[in-house]
Amino acid sequence: MSENITPEEIIKKGTLVFEKTKLMTDAHLSYCPGCGHGVAHRITMEVLEEMGVGDQAIGIAPVGCSVLAYDFMNIDMQQAAHGRAPAVATGIKRLYPEKYVFTYQGDGDLAAIGTNETIHACNRGENIVIIFVNNGIYGMTGGQMAPTTLEGMVSSTSPYGRDLGMTGHPIKITEMLAMLPGVCYATRHAVHKPGLVRKTKKAIKKAFENQRDKKGTSIIEIVSNCNSGWKMTPVKSNEWLEENMLPVFPLGDIKG
Amino acid sequence: MSENITPEEIIKKGTLVFEKTKLMTDAHLSYCPGCGHGVAHRITMEVLEEMGVGDQAIGIAPVGCSVLAYDFMNIDMQQAAHGRAPAVATGIKRLYPEKYVFTYQGDGDLAAIGTNETIHACNRGENIVIIFVNNGIYGMTGGQMAPTTLEGMVSSTSPYGRDLGMTGHPIKITEMLAMLPGVCYATRHAVHKPGLVRKTKKAIKKAFENQRDKKGTSIIEIVSNCNSGWKMTPVKSNEWLEENMLPVFPLGDIKG
Amino acid sequence: MEEIKLMKGNEAFAEAVIREGVDAYFGYPITPQSEVIEYLMLEEPYKRTGMVVLQAESEIGAIHMVYGAAGAGKKAVTSSSSPGISLKQEGISYMAGSELPCVMLNVVRGGPGLGTIQPSQADYFQTVKGGGHGDYKLIVLAPASVQEMADFVEDGFKMAFKYRTPVMLLSDGLIGQMMEKVQLKPQKARLSNEEIREKYGSWATIGHKPEERTIITSLELKSERQEKHNHKLQAKYREIEKKEVRLEKFNCENADYLLVAYGSSARICQKTIQLGKEKGINIGLIRPITLWPFPSDEINKAADKVKGVLSVELSAGQMVDDVRLAVNGKVPVEHYGRFGGMIHSPDEVLEALEKNFIK
Amino acid sequence: MEEIKLMKGNEAFAEAVIREGVDAYFGYPITPQSEVIEYLMLEEPYKRTGMVVLQAESEIGAIHMVYGAAGAGKKAVTSSSSPGISLKQEGISYMAGSELPCVMLNVVRGGPGLGTIQPSQADYFQTVKGGGHGDYKLIVLAPASVQEMADFVEDGFKMAFKYRTPVMLLSDGLIGQMMEKVQLKPQKARLSNEEIREKYGSWATIGHKPEERTIITSLELKSERQEKHNHKLQAKYREIEKKEVRLEKFNCENADYLLVAYGSSARICQKTIQLGKEKGINIGLIRPITLWPFPSDEINKAADKVKGVLSVELSAGQMVDDVRLAVNGKVPVEHYGRFGGMIHSPDEVLEALEKNFIK
Amino acid sequence: MAKIKGAIVVDTERCKGCNLCVVACPTDVIALNKLVNGKGFNPAFPENHGACIACMSCSLVCPDMCITVYRYKPQKETV
Amino acid sequence: MAKIKGAIVVDTERCKGCNLCVVACPTDVIALNKLVNGKGFNPAFPENHGACIACMSCSLVCPDMCITVYRYKPQKETV
Amino acid sequence: MTEEIIIAGFGGQGVLSMGKILAYSGIMQDQEVSWMPSYGPEMRGGTANVTVILSDEKISSPVLRNFDTAIVLNQPSMNKFEETVKPGGILLYDPNGILHPPTRKDIRIYKIEGALEASRMKSSKTFNMIVLGAYLKINPVVKMENVLKGLKKSLPERHHHLIPLNEEAIKVGLEKVEKVS
Amino acid sequence: MTEEIIIAGFGGQGVLSMGKILAYSGIMQDQEVSWMPSYGPEMRGGTANVTVILSDEKISSPVLRNFDTAIVLNQPSMNKFEETVKPGGILLYDPNGILHPPTRKDIRIYKIEGALEASRMKSSKTFNMIVLGAYLKINPVVKMENVLKGLKKSLPERHHHLIPLNEEAIKVGLEKVEKVS
Ligand SMILES: Cc1ncc(C[n+]2csc(CCOP(=O)(O)OP(=O)(O)O)c2C)c(N)n1
Ligand SMILES: Cc1ncc(C[n+]2csc(CCOP(=O)(O)OP(=O)(O)O)c2C)c(N)n1
Ligand code: SF4
Ligand code: SF4
Ligand code: SF4
Ligand code: SF4
Ligand code: SF4
Ligand code: SF4
Ligand SMILES: [Mg+2]
Ligand SMILES: [Mg+2]
């Protein structure tokens, strides 16, 4: 069948088909092993690289595990106060309508403390991209309950499982945002399997193209894991995600 | 035909069919002539009186023209910071689950600065009633644009008419809230005609009954006028409301 | 008295909150104080005492839930750390203006901005001078041990209800995160709604007939009346200044130099006194326990007998203003302190003292 | 120079903002300063200069929009009144921590809480000492006339960009609402994006290649580095204290008594000087124009020649702390002022002076 | 059939002359007074009182709770 | 048909041994090393390198961007 | 010369703009001026008033307790401001709606039938200019030419066609003002 | 007597709970104790350490720069804490993963093959107790009976069945600790 070429030879002679994008720095990510933030970072930067607009992009890091996104995304970035990234993005984008402005936010940041800023940026149809990493928990502060925490799910502030009667249902904020005319694109994805990573990247690309074409707000929700917060191995947490998160937060386009 | 009785005699001999409820104080309302807040106040108090729970009710006044609601509603009341009434109500209701707790809020209060508190109280399904008076403007501060201001509508901060491209569409917050499982009842009404007043009162009654029956959050949106802010006579403003507000904010039950 | 336990400051605070018979805790997670709500959730106080524990959507949500509960005569608590406390400033000003009692905890971290999560005392100005708008004061208690993180809950509520005013415990990441021995008070019963009606029914919104109804508000559009209300607040503050000053003195009798330090810095300074002794330098320490009301009189008196006063804080110099105001020019007053999350060591303090006043 | 106009303080501020070539205004309505955004909207500066004017969803939204714009090297402005400013405290601390330039306006009303919409100076502590968390300072300019409401926009931006630090104009309902003559500067051009890249590209997030990229942040998890950052801030603050103090003196040469007052209170006190003359009492007035950096040295010097110093504020006594710190015990320092929205009259001030130091 | 008759009492000092009751009244009972009240408003009054049918429309829409309504149902009636 | 072959290079110092690439690889190329790296993790390595088909699954799911993938498509092939 | 004036009435009577025209007139003759309104939640039943100061010197406090002149246009304002007129000062009022006329003996009291004259002129908008005319008759603090210049300045361009009407209204006021005591 | 100890290693090695047991043991023999952890964003690659002080007197500062004893369980901690041991003090370390063993001459250095012994005991959870045992052999700051009491106190009731295993681990540590220099 095929010629008997060694891996070493392939590395020398073959085509390079995948390597770290230059729009990610060389710094080692500060995330826990297997944390989905890494993939979400990478594909966002890959999209900007492929569009050739890395030097025209301004990213907003949230407060959450990805607060240090600016250490890893090799572009201009601002660190926003907890929940306020969409307001910060508004401030930038209104003054630089030609730049590519995006926020990168967790579920605590976007759907708890930052709900107001999120909704009103979307309602104004700010021409920005929101990358929303929903891991159903406050990762950075040690695994407290988020508004997106599932029913019965254990967290450090729901140690006996989230009780809907006491704290309400996991909020489907992306569905709510999709109702707003200012939002041109709302979609939910995941990054724990190769195929899903490819799809998510496509969605991110579409979002930035929307921005280029001045269509309004695009929101990409990425359902992700938090191994530390969920207290599972990375592999286990991805299985758990598939079985438990996805039924509540089904993947696919919600709008646009 | 009927006997020839004078009005004076009717007043003496007839049945009293309408008078100011005792749950409104005797103080003259501080609202502008014809302002819908007065009717909304009155029917809320009438419901509490009819249910016989005035002395078990705790109301939350917002920041807005109805900030002084506590001067007029003859029950225990707290004045909440701008937008925070649902949080204040949460604090009370969680500790007095048997009391009747409600917020009374304007559109600036509920749908601009207070969006976060509103959404999360509703998402938790706080067992409270929210009376939401949407007059499409910031009345108290002199008629600035609200998130609910209509397209092209003139306000002191949209002097050439609201420009959707610049400030987004009028937000339909009640529809958004209706998506939340914690909300058991979401409905939109008006009070500028006698029949509508009757219907709105019924809705308010249903809302308080929901609270009694521990069903979750009920929200009654009342589309109302702001003669001062709109710079129209009361009669004209009610006509304008009918023609312009209602197509965007159609009356009727949204949920429950 | 109960048995001795080993607890974190944050946990001791949380346990003391339950035992105080507090009705509700509302909070939002933030390092280095998330253990407060985590401990409460784990302990299920709603089973132990019926206490409500709710994770709010934000710090702003939390403070206004406290406002609601306090306005209804309940004992309510919130806690946070620096950025979260900044967000609560409007609410705190409202609580002070509406004269509502509550106990709040700030486990301070280094700022400004997102800063660092390490210990700091750089929120002194915000807490003691006025982070929110308008003329108001918070009673500020500064615990210096895990034991005090527990004890000041009761002390705080006593004052909060006596004066109908919010009380802040100003702690920091060091006191919040460290474990020490702590002896907890026995469980107090929560007040029943009838007891609340009895005690606070005259002002709290607990449901009344129209004739007796109560209103919680800080609004007064008529300036004459607003001024009157402000005078009432000021009179209350003068009374608190007269009655509630608390401090601790160490080695003050024959000291040549005086350190003034609170909370974790005061602990470090105690070791400096020892180091000083070893070097033949006689150092006293005044530790304000109440940062407001500030122990100005005692510091003023102490200043008569020393050659210099050093305000030692984990900040770029904030309390030093109050120390200077107290000393009023009698002797030089200087500031020393590491900040931005760094903690000075006892010998660094000694060195600073020597540099400022001796060498 | 342009022709003389009659304008409200708030309007003069807004017009000066346009003429300064400001890039963006973000704000949320609140009395007594809603005229700022109303004037801007009416003037359509997006047509005049391309300036962005956006009504935010809240004060918190507004300050973080300013953060974003400032972080991208733009001149951004926000304004509010007391409760709204309290809500901005976290954002302000972030701006200081991230070293971002901007000009903010607080048209103070009476507090605490919802208070009253009438003029007040009770946000001095919040503004000057630190409303937000952490060790930071705002440059604070206190306009005392409609003219200064306009002029300080330019002055503020000069300092804001020179030191990369937020600047606050501390005004009040009186200055904001009154009309006076004002002479406006001619229109400045807004900086082009190229000019911004040239001037601020080294720190502003305006889109860069990876090698040159810029980051705006106030986070530094390593305490050593956070402390270093704090030292950098403190060094900047020392420099500002050295270079930027501004004040105005009235009748100070041979005065027996000294008033210290800022903003609207300083205007009232000018009339008190006249009233004093009529009674044979020789009164001087120092009006701090910068509240931080505070004119401590000048006040200290002036204190050598007088028998007493009265700090006259529309508050229960806040700036008086800084006056006392400046005087450092040389002569008695007292406070006088109406508050809660009330305004003292010149004769009330005179009376207070007599009561404190003469009778 | 017994035709219901009605009468209203307007608290003229509360009234702000907004005219809403005037517009709401199906039988044109109400008008605004030419004279102003203590607040400077032209208050409503039952100009055409006899036409009142106690439908309460006026009182329902009155934001200031100025109107009290009485109803009279004749006891006996020839059909 | 020319069967595509592949090879990967793992940056073992970046690797956190999360095992996601191991699970993602359709041809079981990757395993975790028994020895820890400088960060204390057991890094991934191509244990069964010859099986690699350059599908990039591993590199796509690797959160730490440790894996570089090369592809080789034989030029000539007997059908 | 310093003239300290309070103008007070209902919202909608043109109190603030009358003050503004006065202030602008002062500017036209190179005086220092200040204009300080009462402000509050819109409408909701209060009175509106404005303090105007015209002076040859720099104005210190724009807020005053006592006035050289009070122009009073409704009863609540009468109740509040009659007593604030300095002895020897001026009180000018429109008797329409005034139930309790002023009683002080130590001040000069004038009246102007502003509402009446305005309705005669068939334009309620002229009301405040009639009152202004009355005031200028009693106390010509600003020259008529400067008033006209002030008018022009304070009116937006698109309203300049109304200037003649306003001028006429001022003249009516000049003529119709009456001394009461 | 005052003993100031730093225990440092990777998160997950049981550093904090080892400190806690030590502190509880001190309490059992009526000492003053303090336990001060490093704290930071969870995981994300840092080391964990805790300062434990046992003293017969009241403890002033819980934060120290120098220690009587350093118990070091990984290389980064070795880099950081070797130099913080007071002259004459103790450095105890687990050589597993240590590339650069300590070099100081003025302190007493011991090692314990904690990881190795734990894997021999077939329970990685015993690791920290083995190290604790080693430390107590070198410096018996707390009596064994108090350690057992401390263990009991610091473990939640539902884990009390693990006490015998822990006891055994401590004994292993007592036996296996070796003096290096
Ligand atoms: C005002 C404020 N409140 C709270 C915090 C503490 N805090 C930091 S991150 C975080 C939650 C992060 O959760 P999420 O947004 O879901 O991000 P993740 O870490 O899960 O990616 C919180 C509450 C803060 N830094 N600032
Ligand atoms: C924190 C804060 N921001 C702003 C304000 C000013 N303010 C008072 S009422 C109001 C808007 C009220 O509008 P709405 O809620 O629609 O009530 P309405 O007056 O129309 O009934 C605003 C912005 C305030 N008091 N507090
Ligand atoms: S704590 Fe959770 S979200 Fe944060 S880096 Fe670790 S796994 Fe990822
Ligand atoms: S301003 Fe508008 S909302 Fe407020 S009282 Fe007047 S009419 Fe009603
Ligand atoms: S009750 Fe009906 S008929 Fe009678 S006045 Fe009122 S609206 Fe008219
Ligand atoms: S509706 Fe009420 S306030 Fe309006 S005119 Fe009629 S009676 Fe008067
Ligand atoms: S490229 Fe595909 S086949 Fe090759 S190692 Fe990676 S996942 Fe396995
Ligand atoms: S996915 Fe990446 S980090 Fe995880 S084991 Fe594989 S190479 Fe290592
Ligand atoms: Mg999360
Ligand atoms: Mg409104």
Image (cartoon, coloured by chain):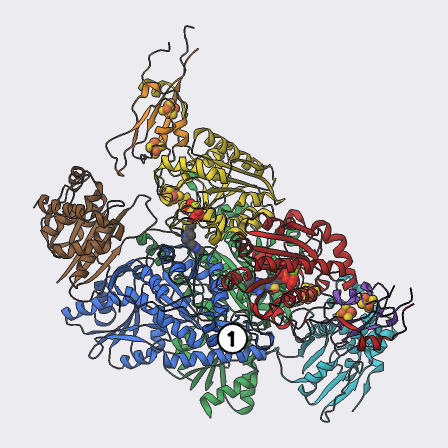
Chain colours: A red, B yellow, C green, D blue, E orange, F purple, G brown, H cyan
Q: Which of G18 and D85 lies nearest the eye of the viewer?
A: G18
Residue type indicated by callout 1: Trp
Q: Which corner quadrant of the image does residue C173 belong to?
A: bottom right
Q: Residues within 10 Å of mark 1 (few under 14, many from 20)?
A: some
Q: Is residue F70 visible?
A: yes
In the rendered picture of this protein, how many numbered marks are placed on residues? 1
Q: Which of D175 and D27 lies nearest the eye of the viewer?
A: D27
Q: Chain of mark 1?
A: D
Is residue F50 found left or right of B79 in the rendered image?
A: right
Split into 4 quadrants, where in the image is the N terminus of chain B? Answer: top left
Q: Quadrant of ligand 5?
A: top left
| In the rendered image, the vertical position of residue E69 relative to residue D131, given as above or below | above
Q: Which residue is mark 1?
A: D203
Is residue D262 found left or right of D280 in the rendered image?
A: right
Is residue D151 found left or right of C55 in the rendered image?
A: left
Residue C88: where, in percent of width, then height?
50, 60
Helix, strand, or loop for circle 1?
A: loop
Residue G81: where, in percent of width, then height?
20, 50
Q: Is residue C1 visible?
A: no
Q: Which of A139 and D49 lies nearest the eye of the viewer?
A: D49
Residue B220: where, in percent of width, then height?
52, 39
Split into 4 quadrants, where in the image is the C terminus of chain B? Answer: top right
Q: Which of D48 and H27 lies nearest the eye of the viewer?
A: D48
Dot 1 beta carbon under 8 Å from ligand 1:
no
| In the rendered image, the vertical position of residue C175 relative to residue B41, given as above or below | below
| In the rendered image, the vertical position of residue A171 relative to residue C317, given as above or below | above
Q: Residue at x 52, y 88 (%)?
A: C351
